[in-house]
Image (spheres, helix red, strand yellow):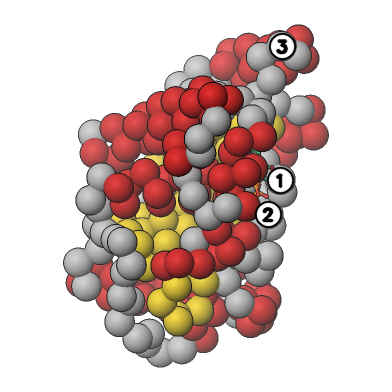
């Protein structure tokens, strides 16, 4: 089993949109997926509600063991709950130990992939997820505020890799909500590619069909509108890029 975390300490950048589309896409390819929502906002849990298992994210940290995860259509959701806030008071080492134990159990239960959506904060939840992960990918917005956060994102990932998890592989950034007609976005994308040549994945446009998909609990490729077609292509392209890097 491989574990992939979606992380960026900035909110509203497309983490959950990326997460649910990776889940839908890879599940449709036949992979058995444990989908963990570590954000108390519970956006991913809302969209993936059909895959609930009754297991709560806080259980991963606060209970010695969890019930067997029973997938629905290849996906077993570990849903966000309010007690997740409590894990921020745990010593990081305890959080890592508890999470690692549950991830090992998922691997033993035959899951192929564990995908983790995180909250926009550099707390125990995100740090522990990065500590147990094989891969991390970071959606970003092509706005200056988002750029300012990249340095701290790089620092966080580097720190975890140097001190806790040498296996952590940063697959890169997904420019999300990209508006190709906006000169600022085009310039910012070019700057990003210059600064991080090997870390900029395919962009995903700012497309309302993606928001509609999240609201209606289906992937954007299931939305029957001409405008959704381009969005579907872009999302699938970046999902494929990530897939290829994970199996390399
Ligand atoms: N590519 C996109 N185009 C248009 N809207 C998007 C796109 N990706 C996400 N959104 C919308 O933007 C908002 C924030 O996205 P979300 O994935 O929840 O970000 P995060 O998880 O980083 O906070 C949501 O309302 C979502 O529907
Ligand atoms: Mg989110």
Residue 198 visible to the viewer? yes
Q: Is mark 2 within 8 Å of ligand 1?
A: yes
Up/down of 1 relative to 245, above or below: below
Quarter of the rendering containing residue 100: bottom left
Instruction: Please identify the quadrant where the C terminus is shown.
Output: top left
Up/down of 114 relative to 205, above or below: below
Q: Nearer the viewer, residue 44 or 166?
A: 44
State the CA–CA distance, disc 1 to disc 3.
Answer: 21 Å
State the CA–CA distance, disc 1 to disc 2.
Answer: 8 Å
Is the C-beta separation of discs 1 and 3 under 8 Å? no
Residue in the image at 51% along x and 39% along y? 223
Going by the picture, which residue comes out furthest to the front? 224
Per the image, the residue denoted by label 3 is 181
Q: Earlier in the sequence, mark 1 or mark 3?
A: 1
Crowd class of label 1 (few under 14; some 14 to 19; many from 20; radius 10 Å): some
Per the image, the residue denoted by label 2 is 120
Q: Position of residue 4 (x, y in %)?
A: 40, 51
Q: Earlier in the sequence, mark 1 or mark 2?
A: 1
Q: Is mark 1 within 8 Å of ligand 1?
A: yes
Q: Nearer the viewer, residue 194 or 183?
A: 183
Is the C-beta separation of discs 1 and 2 under 8 Å? yes
Residue in the image at 50% along x and 17% along y? 197
Q: Is mark 3 within 8 Å of ligand 1?
A: no
Q: Position of residue 90 (x, y in %)?
A: 60, 80
Q: Is residue 209 rendered to the left or right of residue 240?
A: right
Q: Position of residue 5 (x, y in %)?
A: 47, 52
Q: Is residue 61 rendered to the left or right of residue 132?
A: right
State the CA–CA distance, disc 3 to disc 2.
Answer: 28 Å
Per the image, the residue denoted by label 1 is 12
Check disc 3 and report its element: helix, strand or loop.
loop
């Amino acid at each position: 089993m491989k574990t992939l975390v979606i992380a960026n300490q900035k909110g509203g950048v497309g983490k959950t949109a990326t997460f649910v589309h990776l889940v839908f896409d890879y599940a449709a390819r036949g992979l058995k997926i444990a989908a963990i929502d570590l954000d108390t906002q519970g956006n991913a849990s809302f969209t993936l509600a059909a895959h609930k298992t009754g297991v709560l994210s806080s259980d991963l940290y606060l209970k010695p063991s969890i019930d067997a995860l029973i997938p629905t259509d290849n996906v077993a959701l570990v849903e966000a709950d309010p007690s997740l806030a409590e894990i921020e008071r745990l010593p990081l080492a305890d959080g890592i130990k508890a999470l690692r134990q549950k991830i090992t159990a998922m691997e033993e239960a035959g899951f192929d992939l564990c995908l983790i959506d995180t909250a926009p904060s550099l707390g125990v939840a995100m740090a522990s997820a990065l500590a147990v992960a094989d891969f991390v990918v970071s959606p970003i917005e092509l706005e200056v505020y988002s750029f300012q956060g990249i340095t701290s994102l790089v620092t966080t990932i580097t720190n975890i890799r140097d001190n806790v998890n040498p296996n952590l592989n940063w697959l890169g950034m997904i420019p999300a909500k990209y508006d190709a007609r906006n000169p600022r976005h085009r310039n910012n994308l070019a700057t990003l590619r210059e600064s991080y040549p090997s870390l900029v994945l395919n962009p995903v446009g700012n497309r309302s069909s993606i928001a509609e998909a999240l609201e209606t609990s289906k992937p954007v490729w299931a939305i029957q509108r001409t405008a959704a077609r381009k969005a579907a292509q872009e999302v699938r392209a970046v999902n494929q890029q990530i897939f290829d890097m994970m199996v390399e």
